[in-house]
Image: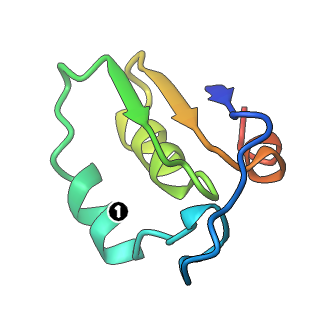
């Protein structure tokens, strides 16, 4: 799985969570991943957070070949994403 972060990202002070980190509920991840078909060869998780969506998508596609790319603004979370 490819992983990216954006260095130097500054969180806002308008009451939002740091880095706008809002984890996707597991029920929504399950619903989205259940719609993946055998033709999906590339999957992008543009706000990867803890990587649960990307990991679930990769697991759903297994054993079929699939490229999963996870993008996360927070460097620490990006570093902890599965590879």
For the residue carrying disc 1, how many other residues have a C-alpha within 10 Å: few (<14), some (14-19), or many (20+)? some
Residue at 49%, 43% in the rendered image: 54
**On-image quarter of the C terminus:** top right
Up the image or down, 5 lies above or below 25; here it is: above
Q: Is residue 45 left or right of residue 73?
A: left
Q: Position of residue 7 (x, y in %)?
A: 78, 34
Locate residue 9, reporting x and y percent.
71, 45
Give the structural element (helix, strand or loop) at label 1: helix
Q: Nearer the viewer, residue 16 or 27?
A: 16
**Residue 38 picture quarter:** top left
Q: Residue at x 21, y 39 (%)?
A: 36
In the image, what residue occupies the spot 80% across and 48% down?
Answer: 80
Farthest residue in the bottom direction? 15
Q: From the image, tell me which residue sits under label 1.
A: 29
Q: Quadrant of the N terminus?
A: top right
- Viewer-nearest residue: 39 or 10: 10
Q: Position of residue 16 (x, y in %)?
A: 54, 77
Query: Residue 75: x and y, percent?
Result: 80, 44
User: What residue appears at the point 54 percent right and 48 percent down from the top-left corner?
Assistant: 48
């Amino acid at each position: 799985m490819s992983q990216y972060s954006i260095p130097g990202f500054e969180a806002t002070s308008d009451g939002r969570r740091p880095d706008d980190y809002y984890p996707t509920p597991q029920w929504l991840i399950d619903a989205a991943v259940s719609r993946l078909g055998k033709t999906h060869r590339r999957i992008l998780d543009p706000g990867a957070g803890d990587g649960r969506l990307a990991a679930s998508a990769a697991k759903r596609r297994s054993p079929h070949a699939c490229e999963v790319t996870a993008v996360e603004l927070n460097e620490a979370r990006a570093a902890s994403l599965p590879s």
